[in-house]
Image: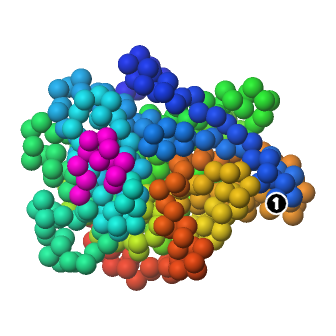
Amino acid sequence: MSQDRWIEIPDDIVRILKLWRPTPLRRAFNLEKELRTPARIYYKDESGNGPGSHKPNTAIAQAYFNKKEGVKRLSTETGAGQWGSALSFACKLLGLKCTVYMVRCSYEQKPFRKSLMHLWGAEVFPSPTNRTKAGRLILKKMPHTPGSLGMAISEAVEDAVTHEDTKYSLGSVLNHVMLHQTVIGLEVKEQLKLIDEKPDIMIGCVGGGSNFAGFTFPFMRDKIEGQDVRFIAVEPAACPTLTKGPYRYDFGDTAQMTPLLKMYTLGHNFVPEGIHAGGLRYHGMAPLVSMLFNEKLIEARAYHQTGVFKAAVLFAGTEGILPAPETAHAIKAVVDEALRCKKENKEKCIVFNFSGHGNFDLAAYDAYIGCKLKDYEYPEKAIKIAIKSLPRVD
């Protein structure tokens, strides 16, 4: 924790980040042409590292500081597998062991993410498991559960607190993760200056909030000081934390092992449907992102997955890069905003965070192309039940 405005990145971390940073800021000329929009669309491409997403920005830092403290092993959860891949990668580079509890439906949907983690020496288990007390209790109540990030966090935290050589590492939500990810937005600021651009709209997908925060937080002061810039956070309609959840204190995990966090939440017992954007299936939202949304400094919207995949296929067909299903949520909002610019004949600068590629998500794209992907209605009844279990805090 620190009250300092700037935190220097240690040289040892910089040397590793230089494997893929700085990342390119690209202009989506072909997408603009296809949409016939007067908007200028740019995207920050965070997919050009081994794990293929923004996640290594914090994985390297967390592994480095744990290594300095003498920790031998890190335990964590992962949804779609991007975070699990990133931490496995970081642990491999820094000489730590890594244990990953992967949400069961993603474990089954994305087998090659599991292969990538194994390649970097991690052990991976489909959560919930019988390895932990939390997992066994969950399986007893819900033997056929698809799992959730809240459940996987419970298992990873229990693993850490029951082994002296192990610490828990989280890939999103918490303040230090947001801090590590601001390297994204800081680079975007410098890159936009080089081409004499200022963003009118900045867009990112949100699950726990880390890629959105890292992308937009360096620009937040500009908005507070009067610059006309919109920040749009995009989430799945099947897990509408910001757009449908209350702003309350809640646990970050299903077994109630974490400290209480003030955040938008659907309730720690809420289990989202098994959508293919596994990294966005989290019941809560980062407290910092939640606070900014509550202060109306950022906007939020939710989309169904078939519309999201339609936008992803459009992007892949014009720009030649396959987005992760999570990233595709941001792209759907970009398309909508670009078409609005077309309708209103306004030349706006739209910048979004391309948080990860979808090269390990081809099964999801096959399902979309084969018309096997379905949308899930807003689970109002399930959320109401889950919210009833929220802790009461005066």
Place of residue 294 in the rendered image (x, y in percent of width and height, measured from the top left): 52, 55
* Image spot of residue 224 (x, y percent): 64, 39
Decide if residue 163 is in sight here.
yes
- For disc 1, the neighbor class at 10 Å (few under 14, some 14 to 19, many from 20) is some
Tell me if residue 187 comes above or below residue 77 in the rendering. Answer: above
Q: Residue at x 87, y 52 (%)?
A: 38
Quadrant housing the C terminus:
bottom left
Please tell me whether residue 237 belongs to the stretch shown in magenta: no
Quarter occupied by residue 252 = bottom left
| Residue type at tag 1 | Leu
Relative to 252, is 297 on the left or the right?
right
Residue to which mark 1 is pinned:
35
| Quadrant housing residue 92 | top left
Q: Residue 210: percent from the left, percent from the top? A: 46, 46
Residue 236 in view (yes/no): no
Which segment is the magenta one?
114-125
Local SS, label 1: helix
Q: Is residue 336 left or right of residue 62?
A: right
Q: Position of residue 100 (x, y in %)?
A: 26, 50
Answer left or right for 70 relative to 287: left
Residue at left 33%, top 30%?
93
Question: Please, which residue is most extreme toward the top here?
Answer: 11
